[in-house]
Amino acid sequence: MSEIYRELKEFILYFLSQVYGFFAVLRRDLYYNGFIRQKSLPRPIISVGNLSVGGTGKTPIVIDIAKKLQERGYYVVVLSRGYKRKSRGTLLVSDGKKIYTDWKSAGDEPYLIAKYGIPVVVSKDRYKAGKFVLGKVDVDVFILDDGFQHYQLKRDVDIVVVDGTKPFWEDEVLPLGRLREPPEVAIEYADIFLINKVYTLDLIEIKRLEFHLEKYLKPVFVAKEKFEKLTNFEDDFPLDILYRKRVGLFAGLGNNKQFFKVMEKLSREYDFCITERISLPDHYNYKKLELPDVDVDYWITTEKDLVKLSYRYRILALKYEVSFDEKFYDELIDRIFK
């Protein structure tokens, strides 16, 4: 009986996955074939998105792109939905100089982006967000955060982020897997592929990912990931402070296991002992921080989690710094400004 139940469950999930994928493709086709009108903003738009539900590391990439464009003299504004925020309507989170709200109203990811001196606007309607900020903040280019499925707004460049530990071509459409659209959608509509989450992979695995994506004749770039610092947002600290220390980990990400794997690799490099691992749901609210009363010297979490914590005694975040070859930023600028 259990075998029959298992097979029936797999069939139902497969059927629902096929239905979900069909309607996801249909919805995109309705926009891209003109049956539903797309809206345009009077500035170029870079979309940074993916196929998976959470956990591919888009936020650090959005921060990196915004900072690199700022360094080259461009005024950048990030448009975000503000997932699970406690506010409504259109909200200016930051003008790049001042943050005007808290993480609850902004959403944890937009608030984290704002902490890096990047203008951010949140709204369910990204077109309204863009119109709202024009005239309030200087804008040369918009970055559409998690925008691959936001078909309502025309974009100039569609960047698809690929999780190196779980590439989209090895996954299935919801609810059978984690994909919001079938893999062929990314292959057809992506302009640029960015591979990240490669820190725990070896060179052969990374080259295999590159080789797979290059056959689609789209530019492919691999993230340069650095985990060299800890932060409390007021000061940064070298990872050396964890030497011979007992460390507890907690995180509320879409993929907590990857964070734990990174910390395990760092523990071997910097010689510290991980004694606790606490996995929380993605976008965890932290109404009250309840950590077990255990003997640890430090609790380490992520920047996305730390922005939601007011109580920070012995709690630090691992600073995730990501960048790409300069050819990537040249490619972006060539596509939108030349």
Image (cartoon, rainbow, N blue to C red):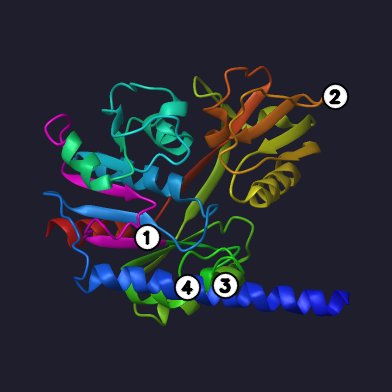
Q: Residue furthest bottom?
A: 215
Q: Earlier in the sequence, mark 2 or mark 1?
A: 1
Number of residues whose C-alpha sits closer than 10 Å to that of mark 4, classed few (under 14), some (14–19) or many (20 or more): many
Foreground label between 3 and 2? 3
Up-down: is 306 above or below 130?
A: above
Q: Amino acid at mark 2?
A: Asp
In this rendering, would 34 be left or right of 182?
A: left
- Residue 227 drawn in magenta: no
Provide the residue span drawn in magenta.
134-160
Tell me the quarter of the picture where residue 239 sits. Answer: top right
The prevailing secondary structure element of the residues shown in magenta is loop
Foreground label between 4 and 2? 4
Choose between 290 and 116: the one closer to the eye.
290
Q: Earlier in the sequence, mark 4 or mark 3?
A: 3
- Contact (CB < 8 A) between labels 3 and 2? no
Q: Earlier in the sequence, mark 3 or mark 2?
A: 3
Number of residues whose C-alpha sits closer than 10 Å to that of mark 3, classed few (under 14), some (14–19) or many (20 or more): some
Foreground label between 1 and 3? 3
Q: CA distance from mark 1 to mark 3?
A: 19 Å
Residue tagged by mark 1?
Answer: 149
Residue for point 43% across, 78% down:
184
Residue tagged by mark 2?
Answer: 295
Question: Quick one: SS at disc 2?
Answer: loop
| Residue 46 percent across, percent down from the top left | 27, 54
Residue for point 11% across, 49% down:
42
| Mark number displayed over residue 21 | 4
Question: Quick one: SS at disc 4?
Answer: helix
Q: Earlier in the sequence, mark 4 or mark 1?
A: 4
| Mark number displayed over residue 16 | 3
Q: What is the quadrant of the N terminus in the image? A: bottom right
Q: CA distance from mark 4 to mark 2?
A: 48 Å
